[in-house]
Image: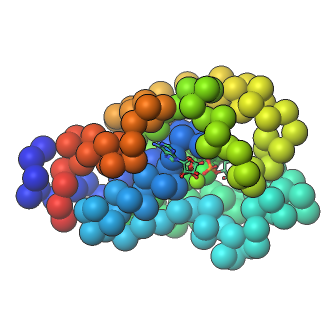
Amino acid sequence: MSDGERIALPIVLVGPMGAGKSRVGQRLATSVDAPFIDTDLRIAERYGPIDEIFAREGEEYFRIVEREVVAEALREEAVISLGGGAVLHPDTLADLAGLAVVWLRVSREAVRPRLAGGNRPLIAEGGLDRWSAILAERRPLYEAVADLSIDTSRRSVARIVDAITERFGGTR
Ligand SMILES: Nc1ncnc2c1ncn2[C@@H]1O[C@H](COP(=O)(O)OP(=O)(O)O)[C@@H](O)[C@H]1O
Ligand SMILES: O=C(O)C1=C[C@@H](OP(=O)(O)O)[C@@H](O)[C@H](O)C1
Ligand SMILES: [Mg+2]
């Protein structure tokens, strides 16, 4: 698609923790002048900090509120960054089948510094080994829903945004 054509909206970013979904989504939305939704931010606005939800209510409860927020977001014409585990919900998988979905990939080596200092309860214990194990479980899901996959390991955010707009169109 060339510049001047409208970008397909919604466009949805999936992939593992630290792949850059939140950062790239924000930059892409600014670049194509579209609204931006980070579902984790919406969850936190409504239910409080994500690590506190995990600590207080557990992962199962988090997935329920995540689904509610994701379902709502996917009905909007926006750039949408999901949390890494949103694809675990079968209804979300079904919704994604009809949408423009980008899978941001990242190597274990490249993700290490990106996860440092982050507040991600699922890898608070187990660190990078846990991250790899979680990715192995979810990779088939990302693969199944993605229309485009981009290895972000050695790419700048700007180049990733370029690759997405090249595929899906640049301006609204
Ligand atoms: N392409 C990239 N190159 C280097 N650092 C990146 C890149 N994309 C994101 N980051 C950094 O990695 C960290 C995790 O990014 P984030 O967008 O929160 O990932 P996600 O939402 O997929 O978990 C942040 O500090 C972000 O600035
Ligand atoms: O992979 C996951 O299950 C999670 C990823 C996080 O989002 P990011 O992928 O944006 O880090 C956040 O939704 C939560 O901590 C659970
Ligand atoms: Mg994120």
Q: Is residue 138 left or right of residue 9?
A: right
Residue pictured at 66% horizontal, 59% vertical: 66
Residue pictured at 77% horizontal, 26% vertical: 129
Q: Nearer the viewer, residue 34 or 107?
A: 107
Res. 1 in view: yes
Which color scheme does this rendered protein use?
A: rainbow
Quarter the N terminus occupies: top left
Q: In this rendering, is residue 54 above or below 142?
A: below
Residue 36 is situated, as x and y percent measured from the top left of the image, at 42, 67
Residue pictured at 36% horizontal, 53% vertical: 11
Q: Is residue 78 left or right of residue 114?
A: left
Which quadrant of the view contains residue 133?
Answer: top right
Residue 6 is situated, as x and y percent measured from the top left of the image, at 16, 59
Which quadrant of the view contains residue 53?
Answer: bottom right
Which quadrant of the view contains residue 131?
Answer: top right
Res. 99 in view: no
Q: Is residue 22 left or right of residue 28?
A: right
Residue lying furthest right in this view?
Answer: 56
Residue pictured at 25% horizontal, 54% vertical: 8
Q: Nearer the viewer, residue 15 or 99?
A: 15
Q: In this rendering, is residue 38 above or below 87?
A: below
Residue 5 is situated, as x and y percent measured from the top left of the image, at 11, 56
Residue 171 is situated, as x and y percent measured from the top left of the image, at 17, 61
